[in-house]
Image (tube, rainbow, N blue to C red):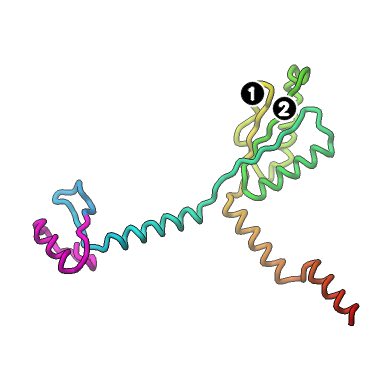
Amino acid sequence: MGPNGEQVGIVSIHDALKLAQEADLDLVEVAATARPPVCKLMDYGKFKYESAMKAREARKNQAHTIIKEIKLRPKIDPHDYETKKGHVVRFLKAGDKVKVTIMFRGREQSRPELGFRLLQRLADDVQELGFVESHAKQDGRNMIMVIGPHKKKAEAKAEKAAAKAQRGGEEPSAEESSEQEASIQEA
């Protein structure tokens, strides 16, 4: 293939190298397994740079899944449970997976059904935001369950940015309104 993508045809290696030298380009083998091998005239340094830029852009736009962990005890106070549930809700809204661990101590180990019921209750409470990815499993002194979000990380970021842009256009923030009130009082 020529420098502009046109077909040159079957050419000997010496002629192809001569064409590349005249055009001040590199002769790059594109398909080595084809018979005859397919080569292309191109600026190889520029090609490598552009492919590296595409790869970097793809990595930047890629969402990294993070697993957040919440630890509970079987005999948790209702208010503490609501606080921990709030954390799980926040993590799921952000598009992160949540690993819920229930730690058993002493005699609590003989009552794993308490931990199982607590995990089921939590899964039911956050059902609209996430789904149970791996069900409750006893692992020594701990019982573990993983909850995955319904929304992907990229969707959650886009939604958060849209909400922030919408708030920015509506009203001034609390700091701006207090500064405006202070300037009115001084005058």
Disc 2 target residue = 103
Q: Amino acid at mark 1?
A: Asp
Horizontal arrangement in the rendering, residue 132 relative to residue 167 (left or right)? left
Residue under the image location 15 percent in, 64 percent down: 8
The segment highlighted magenta reads 1-28
Q: Amino acid at mark 2?
A: Met
Name the disc covering residue 139, or none: 1
Badge 1 marks a residue whose secondary structure is strand
**Is 20 drawn above or below residue 68 in the view shown?**
below
Looking at the picture, how far across and down is residue 48, in whole percent? 33, 58
User: Which of the 4 image quarters holds residue 7?
Assistant: bottom left
Of the residues under marks 2 and 1, which one precedes in the sequence? 2
The N terminus sits in image quarter: bottom left
Residue under the image location 64 percent in, 63 percent down: 162
Q: Residue furthest bottom?
A: 187
Badge 2 marks a residue whose secondary structure is strand
